[in-house]
Image (cartoon, rainbow, N blue to C red):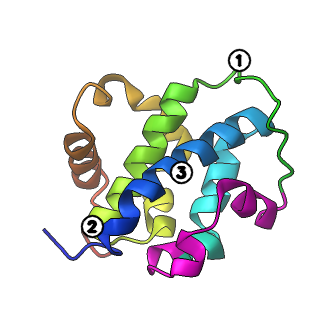
Amino acid sequence: MCKTAYDEAYFDSMIQKTRYLFKLIGRNTKNPFQVIEDYMKSYYRRNMDQGNPLYLNKTPKQILEALGIKIKVEFEISEEFDESVLVWMADIYTYIQWKYNISSERIADKIVPQKLYEKYSPLHEASLENSADKLVKIYRLNEKD
């Protein structure tokens, strides 16, 4: 296994943070796939990828505010986008970035959010690690372009 992106002590909080972030995106935006892609390619995410504690410790609301998105926590669960799938996507993106030390921007370029959303079934039936490993192989994320 290659060197992870940042210390494992941050991994669980990154999973939880990204899950909540993607739920908020699903509830507060008309095009969550574009917002997720923007987030994955943002300077915030770039700093997280590099293990910068200042950014690793930001809250989802702070991150979205930095992306220019106003959050209304009272919004109901999205009827259009399945939050379970958005949570799974958060886990996949976070795990691939952390385990393989691949930039979030590269991951989002190769596995665009809408395509990942569509791959939920049947990949969600495998473990997080197996699903992520399959996606890395399918999209050749370990190979240099």
Few, some or many C-alpha atoms within 10 Å of disc 3 (few <14, some 14-19, many ≥20)?
Answer: many
Relative to 81, is 106 above or below?
below
- Tell me the quarter of the image containing the C terminus: bottom left
96 or 135, nearer to the observer: 96
Q: Is residue 24 left or right of residue 20?
A: right
Whichever of labels 3 and 2 marks the residue nearer the N terminus, that label is 3
- Residue 63 in the image, given as x and y percentages of width and height: 70, 62
Query: Gap in Å between the C-alphas at discs 3 and 2?
Result: 17 Å
Which one is in front in this view, the residue at disc 3 or the one at disc 2?
A: 3
Residue at 50% x, 58% y is 108
Name the residue at the left extreme: 1
Residues in magenta, as a range: 48-68
Determine which of the numbered discs, if any, sits on residue 100 in the image: 2
Is the residue under label 2 in contact with that under label 3 (CB below 8 Å)? no
- Residue 54 in the image, given as x and y percentages of width and height: 59, 79
Residue bearing the label numbered 1 = 79
- Specify the quadrant of the image occupied by residue 60: bottom right
Q: Is residue 29 left or right of residue 51?
A: right
Whichever of labels 3 and 1 marks the residue nearer the N terminus, that label is 3
Residue bearing the label numbered 3 = 18
Question: Would you say the magenta stretch is mainly helix, strand or loop?
Answer: helix
Residue at 22% x, 36% y is 127
Amino acid carrying mark 2 in the image = Tyr
Amino acid carrying mark 1 in the image = Glu
* Residue 30 appears in the rendering: no
Q: Secondary structure at mark 3?
A: helix
* Residue 60 appears in the rendering: yes
Q: Secondary structure at mark 1?
A: loop
Residue at 50% x, 27% y is 84
